[in-house]
Image: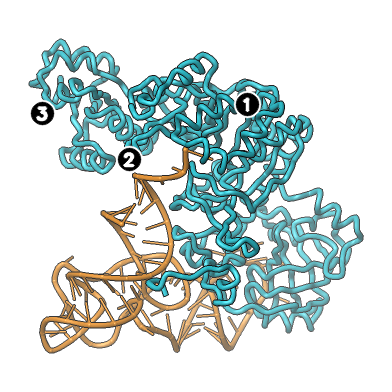
Amino acid sequence: MFQNTTCKRLVKLGGFMFRDKWCNEVNDSDIGSFIKLSGWVFRRRDHGGLIFVDLRDRSGIVQAVFSPEFSPEPHELAHSIRSEFVISLMGEVRRRPEGTENLNLPTGTVEVYVKELTILNESSVLPFMIEDAAEASESLRFKYRYLDLRRHDLQQNLIIRHKAVKSARDYFDEQGFLEIETPMLTKSTPEGARDFLVPSRLNPGYFYALPQSPQLFKQILMVAGFDRYFQVVKCFRDEDLRADRQPEFTQIDLEMSFVEKIDIITVIEGMLQKVFNDVLETSIQTPFPMLSYSESMERFGNDKPDTRFGLELISIDDLVRHSSFKVFLDAIHSGGRVKALNAKGLASLSRKEIDALTAEAQSFGAKGLAWIKVKNGFESPITKFFPNEILNKIAERFDAQEGDLMLFVADKEKIVNDVLSRMRLELGKRLKLIKEGFDFLWITDFPLLEWDAEESRFTAMHHPFTSPVDDDIESLFSAKSPDLTNPASILSTVRAKAYDIVLNGYEIGGGSIRIHRRDIQKKMFEVLGISDEEANVKFGFLLDALQYGAPPHGGIALGLDRLIMLMVGASSIRDVIAFPKTQKAYCLLSGAPSPVVPKQLRELNIKLDAKIL
RNA sequence: GGGGCGGUAGUUCAGCUCGGUUAGAACGCCGGCCUGUCACGUCGGAGGUCGCGGGUUCGAUCCCCGUCCGCCCCGCCA
């Protein structure tokens, strides 16, 4: 399970000054021979006479025995060693006496009788224990990340990350992709996330931006004819953090020429299949299911559904019309929706528990939560507004059995979907419906544009370089200036050649076929309210490139951190990143960000606002 | 910008409702004993700015206000 190829190389080189093998490699074939080992003292069991030390390196653990009869000097010295001392030893590998084997250790049939012991370095008493089982707060773990990273679980996570990246690189290489680096010091772009800025000393008052993604460069590589590009690349977005969001994160980024959506999808499915097979020895079924954006919204209430369980949203818009329940009728009459969930078996919930659910729904934005228990008929404060016939039809549509609890939300469509999708997840967890495994799916046919009510304009749902579907190009071009400021205009109907890949309810990647025609790209900027002048200043180099024989092209980027998080079963990407930042984007290990000396600021022509000094 | 939870021994936590004697436990740490342990055992011991500042009070870990830090979430994240 550990890096055997590397271990072999270590042995092949004839060992080193400090060791012949890694700890976990010591086995029956070494019995009778003397070997050198080095590592950390994991645990010491001092019996006064015999002393046992578990010697640890990244490969694992082997038991060292200090016996006064075998060798008095190291035995004496071993009294003084403590947890996490770095030691080097030479000794004889022996089979453990019968009955003392440790079946929990791969090296549990042997032990090393120590002839010579060197303490290479001592360790202060640790702020927390290295054992996986010993819990330590995350802030302490981050401050002493080098200790945290000595833990087996975290080491495994990073080993799996390494293996996954290696597997992906091998795959892309086999498929004819070239890994090409793109600049980290690049240009700020108006759309999208907030940029991290880097002041330019040589160009006073000017700034680079760290890339949010290599988007424009990889498109230009396509124009340059590289045809198949990929990169494992750091990206930066200066937005607030979450368990699955860090300000710097890694993408597996790719772009291909002469492709349509299905080509990209096939390539990614092949890659994931190989990676899961190589790294987890798990076979995943392809092709992945595909769901349109609108169907996903209708059935799950969001565009990244966790499809490991059902509990789908059910629309009762049509049935509600026959009721006299004002809350539902008002929602429908003002263009909203009434949708619901069947919480199987939850009719046993008390009024208080239902109130708690209601409060939860309200915290997600609902005005309230209506409910009907199926319990000796229908039990609910709202049954009186519904004819019996309609109640039965509702129950039928829900496949409601005795003991079920139906939960309803009526509001604007966006709120209904938002609230119910969150309730669905919450109930899925509570009812333990979520099965183990990896459920991939594609979400396709996204709208090209999204209405931004605050700015009264359309913004790109994916990004401004995403191609509309061929059938909708005409609609895009037909849009005149009043359509640009009307959320219900023809622009809202234009679909994009965009696709997201979802795993277990997490968006792990997204991409699109790009616009390769200059006229469409210019039109796209126009509908986004980006003037010709601004487009030229911000993206002129792309527009220029598009007029010199740009091939049709498209690509995708996968969020490596999220993918690995899901592969190792972690609950935060912080557990698959060697040096993560806190929610305030602070590095507790290094202390970044930090103030700089005035000279540095002067060189950069930067003056700080008096109120922060 | 907003909502929620947390901060007490080196660590993980209890104590806080209902303010009052010496602030406890486990693990870790230190010392003694221990030759087959592997979360060794056993006997003994040390260890506290109750995050920080202010207020109320005769008296604050406990109540109030502010603030800092960490986590979860909303907004934000093309």
Q: Quadrant of residue A373?
A: top left
Q: Position of residue A547 (x, y in %)?
A: 67, 28
The answer to whether any part of residue A431 appears in the image is no
Q: Position of residue A317 (x, y in %)?
A: 24, 18
Q: Residue at x 27, y 24 (%)?
A: A339
Q: Residues within 10 Å of mark 3 (few under 14, many from 20)?
A: few
Residue type highlighted by circle 3: Pro
Nearest-to-viewer mark from 1 and 3: 1
In the figure, what tint was chain B given? Answer: orange
Measure how far apart labels 1 and 2 are at the Cα level.
30 Å
Q: Is residue A379 left or right of residue A475?
A: left
Q: Quadrant of the C terminus of chain A?
A: bottom left
Q: Residue at x 54, y 38 (%)?
A: A535
In the figure, what tint was chain A given? Answer: cyan
Name the residue beneath numbered marker 1.
A516
Q: Residue at x 61, y 28 (%)?
A: A284
The answer to whether residue A139 is above or below residue A387 is below
Q: What mark, if any, has residue A533 been given in the picture?
A: none
Residue type highlighted by circle 1: His
Q: Position of residue A542 (x, y in %)?
A: 63, 36
Q: Going from the N terminus, do you reach mark 2 or mark 3 first?
A: 3
Q: Residue at x 70, y 22 (%)?
A: A258
